[in-house]
């Protein structure tokens, strides 16, 4: 099918899904969520595909999460607990019986960092930058983006990433276990293709079983996340959360504490 926000390719038994909104640092609007979900489902259940690569167009960003400024209405119906099907994409990344590889150039921030956490493998250019921004803009990922991150990088580092909202280089991400390998930018494409070629020679059924087994230990996070997204929906309606988005768009420091309810709660 024809896509507007992504580029979808299949070659040598690998599917390549490229987020194609470089003018918005590959941030997701409503249409992007649906297109990525459809491409994951198309490739994930295709018996000719052995691996899936997610990447971003333009070289400056892998993905910077949801589009806070450039979003516009879509002909698609709103879906998902918070109005976009983010939890469906997270589930699909785990459910498709193929390794999903994040190929990261530039910024993998916010929701982009969460996708790197969820992907089976993450391979980065030496110019990649990782990090979270949720508490800076009045948001948080209350499911895999927090709880699974703790499994991947450890409790202390995961809390640091969310509480301080710092940025981390590719080498720092490699050292904390968020990234599998780092390559010079001009070698990244070839190296990722090599990883995919190795995977594609292996038994698809054995890999599918292995992926299910790896996921089993953290599958409870899905239920926790659904509860968390329900709470997040309520939080987004508060003045405190709105202050984060308003401050981001107005390019000023948010004043969250002005909107925190007083008294015991």
Image: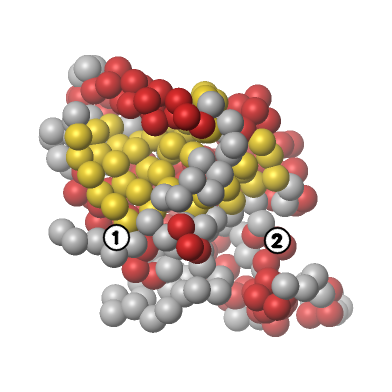
Counting residues from the start of the chain, the first of labels 1 and 2 encountered is 1
The answer to which of 127 and 220 lies nearer the viewer is 127
In percent of the image, x 48 and y 63: which residue is there?
A: 23
In percent of the image, x 46 and y 74: which residue is there?
A: 71
User: Is there any visible trace of residue 15 in the rendered image?
Assistant: yes
Q: Residue beneath label 2, please?
A: 135
Total marks placed: 2
In percent of the image, x 34 and y 62: which residue is there?
A: 5
Q: Quadrant of residue 192?
A: top left
> Residue 219, percent across and down?
43, 41
Q: Residue beneath label 1, please?
A: 35
Q: Horizontally, is 31 left or right of 160 in the view?
A: left
Q: Quadrant of residue 14?
A: top left
Q: Horizontally, is 90 left or right of 135 in the view?
A: left
Name the element at disc 1.
Answer: helix
Which residue occupies the extreme right position in the image?
A: 263
> Residue 109, percent across and down?
59, 51
Disc 1/disc 2 C-alpha distance (Å): 27 Å
The answer to which of 99 and 15 lies nearer the viewer is 15
The answer to which of 182 and 117 lies nearer the viewer is 182
| Image quarter in which the C terminus is found | bottom right
Q: Quadrant of residue 96?
A: top left
């Amino acid at each position: 099918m024809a896509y507007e926000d992504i580029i979808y390719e299949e070659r040598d038994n690998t599917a390549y899904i490229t987020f194609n909104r470089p003018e918005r640092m590959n941030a997701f609007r409503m249409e992007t969520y649906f297109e990525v979900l459809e491409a994951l489902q198309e490739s994930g259940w295709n018996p000719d595909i052995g691996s899936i690569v997610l990447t971003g167009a333009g070289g400056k960003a892998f993905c910077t999460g949801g589009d806070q400024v450039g979003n516009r209405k879509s002909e698609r119906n709103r879906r998902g607990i918070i109005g976009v099907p983010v939890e469906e994409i997270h589930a699909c990344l785990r459910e498709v019986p193929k390794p999903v590889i994040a190929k990261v150039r530039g910024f993998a921030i916010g929701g982009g960092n969460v996708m790197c956490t969820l992907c089976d493998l993450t391979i980065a250019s030496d110019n990649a930058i990782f990090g979270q921004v949720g508490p800076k803009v009045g948001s948080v990922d209350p499911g895999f983006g927090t709880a699974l991150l703790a499994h991947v990088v450890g409790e202390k580092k995961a809390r640091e990433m969310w509480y301080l909202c710092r940025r981390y280089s590719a080498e720092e991400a490699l050292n904390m276990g968020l990234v599998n390998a780092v390559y010079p930018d001009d070698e990244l494409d070839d190296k990722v293709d090599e990883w995919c070629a190795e995977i594609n020679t292996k038994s698809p059924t054995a890999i599918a079983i292995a992926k299910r087994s790896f996921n089993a230990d953290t599958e409870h996070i899905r239920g926790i996340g659904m509860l968390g997204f329900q709470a997040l929906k309520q939080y987004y309606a508060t003045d405190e959360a709105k202050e984060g988005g308003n401050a981001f768009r107005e390019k000023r420091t948010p004043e969250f504490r002005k909107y925190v309810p007083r008294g015991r709660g």
